[in-house]
Image: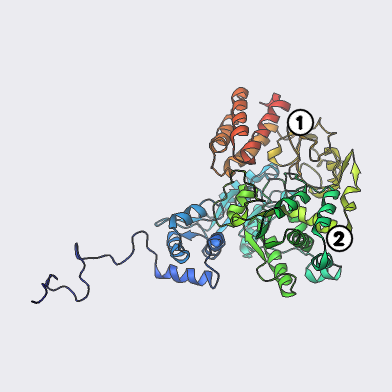
Amino acid sequence: MAPLDTKPSGAPKGVWKSGKGKGRHTPKGRQFTDEAQAEIHRLLGDRPRRRDLLIEFLHLIQDEHGHISADHIAALAVEMRIGQAEIYETATFYAHFDVVKEGETPPPALTIRVCDSLSCEMAGAQQLQKALKDGLDPAEVRVVRAPCMGRCDTAPVLEIGHNHIDHATPEKVQAAIAADDTHAHLPDYEAFAAYEANGGYATLKELRDGGNWENVQEDVLSSGLRGLGGAGFPSGKKWGFVRMNEGPRYLAVNGDEGEPGTFKDRYYLERAPHVFLEGMLIAAWAVEADTCFIYMRDEYPAVLEILRREITALEDVGIVEPGYIDLRRGAGAYICGEESAMIESIEGKKGLPRHRPPFVAQLGVFGRPTLVHNVETLYWVSKICREGPEILNSVEKNGRKGLRSYSVSGRVAKPGVYLLPAGSTILDVIDAAGGMAEGHVFKAYQPGGPSSGLLPSSIDDVPLDFDTLQPLGTFIGSAAVVVLSDQDTARDAALNMLRFFEDESCGQCTPCRAGCEKAVKLMQADKWDQDLLEDLCQVMGDASICGLGQAAPNPIRLVMKHFADEI
C-alpha cells in the first residue's frame, strides 16, 4: 500500500513543515546582517575568539565606527559563541563604548571629552565645556564631560578623538579640528636601543642566568619599597605570597591610574618605559609568571602606543617570547583601578570588585595565583635591582625613609611630578612646585586624591607618607596632591569629589551606589545636614564592598571637621 501523502496540494518539494506552513528560516532572537558579520570577521582577523578578549574586540569596533551597533553585537555574539546580553552588559559598563540600539542615531564622528575633575574645574573646565557646546555644531562634534585624564599639571585638559590638548581653549580646539589633528602625539622617550646601550636588561639577564629570587626579594624589602598604587603594602612580601601557591601563575600590572590628581605613572612611562618593563620582567621571573598582563587606562593613548612598540622590540630581540607580555586596554572605568575589578576586566567582563578572601595572590587572573603591582612600583624594582636598595633606604627626612613621587597640581606655580624625600610636608611639596601661583594664598590641600579628602593649610608639618596621615582621618594614597587657595571653597571641592565617586561607582553594592548619590544631593544644600551625612558616611564606610565606597566619605567628614564655617 502506498504511503499516505499528507503534503498540502501545491506545496514545494522538500521537507514538509508543519504548523502554519511558513517554518522558521532563522534562529530565534535578534538577527544580524551579512554586512555586520563580514565586518566582524575583518576586524577580528586571525585573533583567537577567546572570551577574555571581548573588551579588545569592542575597542576594534568602536575605533572603526565611532560606536557599537546592535547589529555588530549580534554578529560578535555568534562569532564568539556567547550571549548578546553578555556583550551588551559588558559594553555598557565602560564609558568609552557607545552602544547604539536599533533606530537610534549614532553619535557624531568626533567626540571631545572635557575633564571636569578638581584641578581642571579650578582651571575653568565648566566654562570651557559650555563655550565648546555653544560654539560647535552638535551634529558634527559631541562635547561631553569626562573624569580625570591624568594630565592635571596642564589643566584644563580635553581629549579630541585621541589627541589631548593641554591648557585647552576653544581656539586650540578649532585649530585641531581644522587640521584633523585627532590622534595621539608621542613624546620623546628612551626607546629600547638607547636603554640597552646604557646597560638596560643586563640585570634581568643575570638573574635569569642564575639569580636567587629570595635575595632579590630581600633587597626589595630592605629598600622599604611599598605599593605605590595607593595601598602601601610592602612590595617584596607579595612575591612570597604568590609563590606559596602552585602554578601556573600570572603577573598583572595595574596601569589604571584613574585617581583624580594622579599622573606619576604616565610621567615615567612617557620618558623611560623600559625601566618599568625591566622591573616587571624581574618580578615575573621572581614568581615564575607564565604571562604578564599590563592593564593600561584608555585615557593614555600615547602610553599605549609606546608600550606596543617597545614590547614588540623586546620580542624582536628575544628578551620575551611573542605574547608573553599581554597589553590590555581599559575602557573608561575608575573602578578598574581596584585590583580585583582590574582582573575581572582583563578577563573581558564588567569591572566589578570581588569579595575577599580569597585574595588575588591565591585566585587572580583566570583563577590562578596572580602578582599585582602598580607601574611605579615596578619602576623602582628595576632601580633597586640595578643600583641597590640604598637608592631608597639611604634617603631620610623627618624620620621617614625613601622617596615619593608627588603629582602636584592646583594653585601652584609649576604643577608637575616631583620626586622628594618621603618625609616631605605640604610646604616642601609646594616649594618644589615653585610656590603658590601668583595672587593665591594657600588654604587647603588634597594629600592623596579625592579618596583622601581635604586638609587645611594649618596642618602643614605632617610628612606626606604612608602611615603618617591616618591619625588625621586621611592617607597618602597615590600621592596626588591638589593645592587649593583662598579663591576656592572646600565645600565645592568636596562636592566635585563626590560627584566623581557617584559617576564612577560600579553599582554592585547599595551602600556605595545609593550612598554617593544621596551624598551629592545633601551636599548641594545651602546648609549641610551634618548628622544625616555622618550617618550616611558610617554606612558607606562599614558596608561597601571595596575602597571606593569606603573612602568616599573622607571629603565629607574632613570638610565638616576643618571647614565648618562653609557648610
Which image quarter is the N terminus in? bottom left
Q: Position of residue 346 (x, y in %)?
A: 60, 57
Residue 543 at x, y percent in the picture: 59, 34
Identify the disc placed on residue 472. Answer: 1
Question: How far across and down, in percent of the image, does residue 27 sit?
Answer: 34, 63
Q: How is the structure coloured here?
A: rainbow
Q: Where residue 80 sits in the image (x, y, percent)? A: 48, 64
What kind of residue is marked 2? Arg
Query: Hey, what amino acid is under mark 1?
Result: Leu
| Left or right: residue 82 compared with residue 550 | left
Quadrant in the picture for the C terminus? top right
Residue found 88% across the figure and 56% down from its top:
388
- Of 356 and 461, nearer the camera is 356
Which marked residue is nearer to the observer: mark 1 or mark 2? 2
* Vertical arrangement, residue 421 with respect to residue 8, above or below: above
Is 544 on the left-hand or right-hand side of 419? left
Q: Please report whichever mark, 1 or 2, sits nearer to the chain's N-terminal start.
A: 2
Q: Which residue is mark 2?
A: 386
Q: Residues within 10 Å of mark 1 (few under 14, many from 20)?
A: few
Describe residue 34's horizontal placement relative to residue 378 as left or right.
left
Front in this rendered view, residue 429 or 41 = 41
Q: Which quadrant holds residue 123?
A: top right
